[in-house]
Amino acid sequence: MELLEQCQLWCEQGDYQTIVETLEAIPAGQRTPEMDSELGRAYNGLAGEGQRELYQKALELLKPHEEYFEKDHCWNYRIASAYYYLDEEGPALYYFKKALEARPGDEDTQEYIDDCMDRLTLPRFEKTFRQRTRQAGAVFEGIEAELRAMIEADTLREKGGEILAKCRRPLEIALKDVAFELGFNGEKYELILSPEGNRSRLFPLVYFQQHAPASVLEHWNIWVGRQPADADFTLDCGGQQVSARDVQVWLEPIHNGQVWLTLFCEKLLPLLETDSDQVWWMLSALTDQTLGEVAAIALIGGMEVYTAPKDEPPVLLAELPQALRRMGLRLWSDAAEYLDASYLSYELEPVEDPSADWRLDVVAGTTCLPALINDYLSARSATVDDYHRNGIAAGFFLYPIQGFGGENATEKALDFRDALEDAVYEQAGEDVVTFLGGATGLYCGYLDFIGWDLHAVLQAGQDFLEQSGIPWAQFHSFRRDVGGVTLVNREEEKEPEICPETGSLLSAENIETLESFVEDNTGYYGKMLHWLQEFVETGVEEGRFTEKQARRDLQIALWYAYACTNLDEYLYYYRAAQWMKDSERNAAGCGTWYYRYSVTLMYCNRLEEALEYAERGAREEPDYPWIWLQVGKLRAHFGDPAGALQAVKQGLALVPGDYEFLTLEQEIHAGATLEQMLCHWINPEADSLLQEGNDADAEEKQNAIACVTVNEAGLAAFYRMFHPEQYGYTRNDPDCQFPYPVGERQVVVSFRMNEAGLSKLSADWLQWFKDRLDSGDWLTHTPEEGPQGVLEAVFVAQSCRMGFVYRQPEENDYFQIFRDRDGSECSEARFAGYRQEPED
């Protein structure tokens, strides 16, 4: 049996390791392309979840044989698979399509193509660039002192490779294949991140630079782009030194403040005949070193190398900076400043067909990243692919402009675009997005951006667009070969049937049903919430209304919040806050809505927003008494006792002698904390039991209150122990969660609470929990029936009870066990907010 046939047999048996061992034993220079292709397939087969290095190895084996296997289905499928599992769906799609061309109708290939299209239409990353940058910064922070010591000790410059390798590891958490240099300027150490002449790479490098930890910047300068070298800088050419003084240059202004360079270097003429690429590289490097990388990117629009000098008088390359200044051009050294000032305007010949691809209708626009526009219009994706592999999404919002007619139509359209930009910044934050400009077409307006955290950008954009009344809007990646993502579509949304008696999707009979769940001092609030969920789900399934229309319905929102706030657990407050926002447009004059929304925000530790909505509610319906109760508590919390007492006065004028207002008045005078003000029941008898410590539900109430404010010392202790920011930490969404390394595995650790609740957990218990986790004692577990499981996730409740999720690799099945706060197994655990369905 021939070797390749044997490899095929081993592959069918799933014995990829034997294939690797057999083929790796053959020297690389003696392996045929077919052998490398089989070896690449074996590495793909061996690679499991998180084993990116094996997929990378497969790429290294397959890529050199692209021309040889150009029309081969298997080779294209294998290299596409490696890219796919490296989360590089752009090149994966390209090669899967070539694989399908070689084998038309192949179902597996078509499934991968469809999935790539979905993932490129709406990019989904294991970690966004924002998360990667935070993690990389935290890891660099942990090694930078050692790195400084290594640089200082390497006086003979013998350990440069080791030093660079140590620095590369944290940097490549954020930036794959990053080019960088290290140095020391006599005062600070320097990390120089190179865009390698690629303007589009300046954006992520600047983002990384601007989000470096403050402790790192105490000892390090982080530069984007090499700074200009001194005039004596030389490059070696076959033992001959070449400097900027050896190169003649002719300058020709072209466009947008750039120049075209013609270069001649007599010393390089012999090399030019045998290796023109090397000459090109050397002259480019000398130009970068003379001007600095950022200035070279900004000012040099192109260059060519001559074999003889031109007739006109030249300048020396060493004198190029002065020549450019004489032309009135600025030699940029700061990449961030350059990008901020680099917007350019453009005009296009619009396509008048309304069904043409988006942006082909553009008449005029502005941009600070022309490569994205050019790539899109020419159906290329090099720039967006380069971003995608690092968890960065480049795309645009689009929306119709026919509503901006009449006088000053253009101004109105631009004002709308500015308002959208401001709304995204305000809601999502400036660290999630960089806006690049925009355009106006015959039919649509466009707002272009780089999303460092795409989900946050789209959520903020969608919220604004829904409130704006625009008939439809989409997100579209800077790719011509994928579709768009609908954010708003009122054109397809038919008006639902509203009950004239209630003004709601809920009928009078529905409201009677909801009222039946409430008794004098208690109620079946879990059943109420379950009924509401089923009502919405059924209505959507039957086509009577959409979920969005249900979320906008004021009555549904009021009942939903009523159920959640009475369940009195953090997750339900979180769910209510998420649900209620959509109905704000219909809440004018409704103090109840503002009261309930403010309460849900407060119990989610969103206190400034809670105060804002409470104050607005008092203005919307000043005769609604309970809004003043909320205003009083929050004014007192924010240091305005006089305003708080005035709110109590307003409330007592509406409900004289009310127990809650009288109690609040006493506590304001006593200087009580917000937590103390919240530790009450409405009913005086029930509240008396609570204050005396005789209430069976006291622990659950304290757990809910714990999520209102942050104990800064407790939260700092948690960060010192776990350093969650190093591991792609997500917080308050609704939980606090991060992948935590245990041995050679990563285990999802999820605290089922927000950071306020987390900050109240015992530091001693957290240390015990971390120590047990680090020990590996919980890493495997064998149930009474079935094979051993490997730990995938740990869930921690406010009670410090723990849930462990194990996966049985052989059966690809999961099981869960529970432990008490002391680590002992228990038959079941109730996690606050971890119930799939509401309970009574």
Image: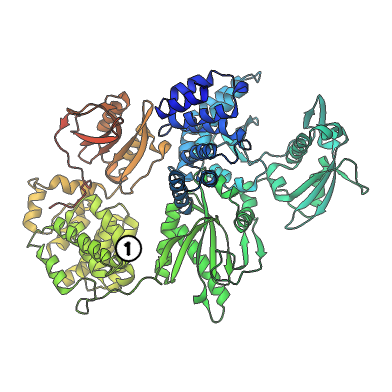
Please state which amino acid type lies under the numbered disc 1.
Lys
Furthest toward the front, the residue is 1
Residue 666 as seen in the image, left or right of residue 755 = left
Residue 814 as seen in the image, left or right of residue 80 = left
Q: Is residue 90 above or below residue 61?
A: below
Which residue carries the number 1 mark?
A: 581
- Residue 773, quarter of the rendered image: top left
- Residue 740, quarter of the rendered image: top left
Q: Nearer the viewer, residue 651 or 63?
A: 63
Furthest toward the right, the residue is 311
Residue 701 as seen in the image, left or right of residue 286 = left
Residue at left offset 29%, top offset 52%:
604
Q: How is the image coloured?
A: rainbow
x, y (%) of residue 381?
58, 50
Residue at left offset 17%, top offset 61%:
531
Residue 823 as seen in the image, left or right of residue 546 = left
Does residue 804 appear anywhere in the picture? no
